Structures are given as C-alpha cells and as structure tokens.
Image: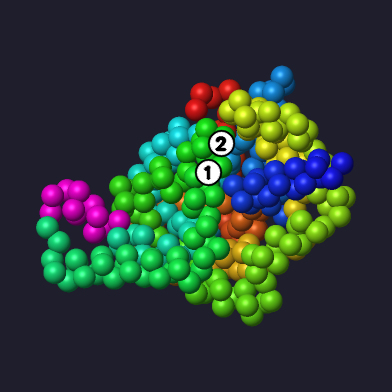
C-alpha cells in the first residue's frame, strides 16, 4: 500500500511538471468546448490502451474584428505536434509566448539568425550576445530549481519517447515572438510577496490526503516493468490516465505561477495590441493557464468562435 501510494504521487508529480493541468460556462456548450474552458486540454481514450493528449487551438474575435488564438502548450510532446506549431507561427502578426526568464530569447534569436545567414555581427552585437549568455548563466546559478527543470524534462522525454518544447520550437524563424511572461526575478519577488515557493507547492502535494489526488492509481509493479522494457506506449497511457483523473488544485488557482503570470501576459498583450498591424495574433501558453486566459479575453470583449484540437501525444506513435 505504501509503495503504491508513493508510486501514485511520484507519477502525478511527473505529470504536473510535464503539463500544468488546470469559467463561466454557457448553456449548450458541447463537450469539446467544456474540456477547453474547464481544463485547457483533452485526453481521448480510444480503448485497449490507445490514448491521445490533445491541446486546444481556440479562435476568438474582438469587438474591433481582430483575431486572437489561444494555442495550448505542453513541455513534452510528439515532435510532429511542435513541427505543426512551427508552421502555424508564420500565420500570425505576433505570438505571445511563455517562458519564465525568456525575455532575451527574441533578441538572441535575431542575432543567432544573422550568424546562420552568414551575416557578420558588429562589435556591439557580439557584446550584446555575450551579455545575454552571461545573464542566462547567472540566472541558472541563482535559481537552481529552475535550472533543474531542463534535465528533468530531458529525462522524462527520453522515458516517454517524446521531444521537448525548447528543443523543437523555433523561436527565431517566424520573427514574430513576443515574450509575455515574468523574468526570473519578477517571479521570485512575486512569490515571496505572497509567501509561495516551488518547494511549498510540492510539499503540499505530497503531504495532501489521498482524496485530493487523481482518482486513477497506477499499478507500481506494471509501471516499473514497463520502465525496464522501455514500453513507451504503456507509460504514456498511464500518465494520461492520471492527467484525465486529476482535478484542479485550489492551492494553484490563485497562485503567482498561474494567475500572476496570466496577468503579466495580458499586461504585455494589452500594450502590444495598441500598436497598428497586429490584426491576427496568438498566445502560446500552457494548458493550466488557458481557462483563466479565456475569461480574460471575454472580459476584453472577445467572443469565442470555435475550438480545434491538436494531438500532442499519441500512445500509438512510434518514438
């Protein structure tokens, strides 16, 4: 029983890191729309261990006719999902993206693009790129927990036969990316102000009662056996079952990690949308953020037109 409970909590922890699972509903909304508004993702069970994790592409029209799409992001996915997104990005005037500490990405991407195109960098640009790299190293050293996430994702991706978002998403090719997230210092300061921390959230999760956990409990023996034989189909399916059964955590609903970063995103969104020429834009953010962002768009007079679903995980896909 103890081993089973620990396995359940461990597997849930993996899922929570891989994709943060999260409105007012109107009468007549279909199941797909409810899945988007309530949770920001959809798990499809096709039977016999065949399952899909799908992320939304939600279309909105503003009172002035401008178009906004919310694109669900997941940190681990089949490479084809990221390749499809890379193609979509060319269709937008701006793409607002999440990445704590990623404020230098658009500029560093532009400089690296010049190098790849065979163009020389000026002395000032070389120094600028060196400064960016120095800031990134300092941030990784100061905020060690954030620095642990990349190798964690790499290990989990290898276990599940998936690719990572930072590995495949091309933040430089479309030339439209706008950083719409907190810096590491902003996140740290905001969390300290509210008495929050990553360690606190993890302890609250691991120390919570079983009734607060996902209703699906993986079999630890079968799970370990699948790990040993590298059965990615079974491992993906088990994690998706946990995601499907997990309910939104009250401890996260008004947190800086969710609500605070949503507010930061729309602070940037509101400023950029005042500029001319931004008639079709996208917000590329994690699933847990989308229900809140849906409400924030409605508050700004936008209307939800439709929701399409993009397959991020397919248990039957070959790694």
**Residue nearest the observer in this picture, 268 or 199:** 199
What residue is shown with label 2?
Answer: 159
Q: Position of residue 123 (x, y in %)?
A: 13, 69
Res. 153 visible in picture: yes
Mark 1 residue crowding within 10 angstroms, few (<14) / some (14–19) / many (20+): few
Q: Where is residue 105 in the image (x, y as percent from the top left)?
A: 36, 60
Residue 229 lies in what quarter of the image? top right
Q: Quadrant of the N terminus?
A: top right
Is residue 130 one of those drawn in magenta? no
Q: Residue at the spot x=70%, y=67% of the render? A: 200
Q: Residue at the spot x=63%, y=32% of the render? A: 227
Res. 39 visible in picture: no
Numbered range of the magenta stretch: 109-119
Q: Residue at the spot x=73%, y=29% of the render? A: 222
Q: Position of residue 234 (x, y in %)?
A: 66, 27
Tell me the SS state at disc 2. helix
Relative placement, left or right, of 212 versus 312 is: right
Q: Give yes or no for contact between labels 2 and 1 (Cβ–Cβ under 8 Å).
A: yes
Residue 120 lies in what quarter of the image? bottom left
How would you classify the magenta stretch by its main secondary structure?
Answer: helix
**Residue nearest the observer in this picture, 121 or 284:** 121
What residue is shown with label 1?
Answer: 155
Is residue 113 one of those drawn in magenta? yes
Residue 293 lies in what quarter of the image? bottom right
Tell me the SS state at disc 1. helix
Q: Where is residue 107 in the image (x, y as percent from the top left)?
A: 30, 62
């Amino acid at each position: 029983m103890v081993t089973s409970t620990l396995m359940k909590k461990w597997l849930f922890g993996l899922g929570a890191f891989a994709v943060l699972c999260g409105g007012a509903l109107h009468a007549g909304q279909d199941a797909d729309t409810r899945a988007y508004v309530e949770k920001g993702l959809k798990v499809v069970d096709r039977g016999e261990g065949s399952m899909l994790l799908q992320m939304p592409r939600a279309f909105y029209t503003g009172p002035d006719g401008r178009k906004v799409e919310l694109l669900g992001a997941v940190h681990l996915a089949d490479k084809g999902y990221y390749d499809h997104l890379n193609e979509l990005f060319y269709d937008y005037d701006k793409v607002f993206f999440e990445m704590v500490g990623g404020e230098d990405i658009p500029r560093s991407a532009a400089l690296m693009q010049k190098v790849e195109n065979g163009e020389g960098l000026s002395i000032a640009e070389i120094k600028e790129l060196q400064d960016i790299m120095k800031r990134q190293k300092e941030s990784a050293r100061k905020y060690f927990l954030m620095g642990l996430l990349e190798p964690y994702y790499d290990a989990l991706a290898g276990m599940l036969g998936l690719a990572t978002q930072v590995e495949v998403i091309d933040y430089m090719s479309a030339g439209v990316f706008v950083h719409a997230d907190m810096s590491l210092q902003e996140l740290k300061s905001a969390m300290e102000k509210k008495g929050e921390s990553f360690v606190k959230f993890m302890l609250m999760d691991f120390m919570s009662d079983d009734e607060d956990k996902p209703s699906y409990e993986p079999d630890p023996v079968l799970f370990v056996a699948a790990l040993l034989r590298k059965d990615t189909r079974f491992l993906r399916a088990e994690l998706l079952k946990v995601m499907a059964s997990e309910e939104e955590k009250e401890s996260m609903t008004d947190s800086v990690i969710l609500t605070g970063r949503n507010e930061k995103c729309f602070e940037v969104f509101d400023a950029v949308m005042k500029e001319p020429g931004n008639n079709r834009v996208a917000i590329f953010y994690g699933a847990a953020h989308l229900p809140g962002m849906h409400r924030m768009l409605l508050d700004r007079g936008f209307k939800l037109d439709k929701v399409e679903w993009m397959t991020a995980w397919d248990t039957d896909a070959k790694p």
